Image (cartoon, rainbow, N blue to C red):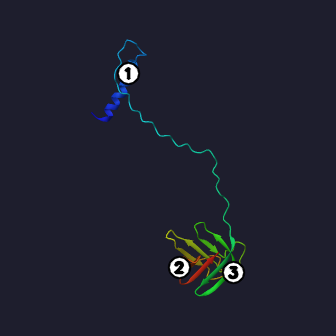
Amino acid sequence: MKTCSIAATLLLLAPLAACNSPQADDNAVTANVASPVVATPSPTPTPSTAPVTKDETPPHSAAKQCRFEVDGKTLLDGRCQVYPMGDGGYTLNTWSAGKPVQSHFAVVTTRADGKADATWNADPNDDKAGDPLGTVTRKDGCWVNQRTRICAR
C-alpha cells in the first residue's frame, strides 16, 4: 500500500475514532486507530512595517592630496577635489566646484577582478574623460600602469 493511501485512510478514520471515545459513549469500545500525523506549516515571513531609511544624500567631492601623471609628465600635484563613484572608483580633480586651474582630470572605474579602467581628458578644455589610459592596478595607494599614476589621499 502506498504511503499516500495510508494517510488518506487514517484521515478518514479519525472522525470514527472521535465518535468511539469514552466521552461520546461510556459503554462503547474504543478503536485503536493511530492519529494522523499532521505537518505543521512553517511560519510565513511577515514583512516589517518599520520604515526603511535610505541614504538619499548624494555623494559629494572632498578635497584630497592628489597626484596625476601621464606619460612621464606631472599634470597635477597638490590638493584637488575627488568625487567617489561608490564602487571604489573616483573622479580625480573633479570640476564640481568649477573648472580648476589645472583642469586635467581622470576617472578610475573599478572592476570585479580588483583592477580598474582609467580615462582622462587629454585636452584640458574637454569636460569628458574620453581618452583611455588603460587598465590600472593599485600600488602604494595609487592606480598605476606604464602610462599613468593616479593618486588621491
Q: Amino acid at mark 2?
A: Gly
- Residue matched to label 2: 134
Mark 2 lies on a secondary structure that is: strand
Label whose residue precedes the other's in the sequence (3 or 2): 3
Q: Indicate whether 55 appears above or below 43.
A: below
Give left or right: position of 18 versus 2.
right
Give left or right: position of 55 versus 9.
right
Q: Amino acid at mark 1?
A: Ala
Point 63% across, 81% down: residue = 68
- Residue matched to label 3: 78
Specify the farthest residue to the top.
27
Q: Amino acid at mark 3?
A: Gly
Specify the farthest residue to the left.
1
Label whose residue precedes the other's in the sequence (3 or 1): 1
Mark 1 lies on a secondary structure that is: helix
Q: Position of residue 140 (x, y in %)?
A: 58, 78
- Pair 2/1: label in front: 1
Q: Position of residue 6 (x, y in %)?
A: 32, 31
Point 55% across, 71% down: residue = 110
Q: Name the quadrant containing residue 117.
A: bottom right
Label 1 environment density (alpha carbons within 10 Å; few <14, some 14–19, many ≥20): some
- Residue matched to label 1: 17
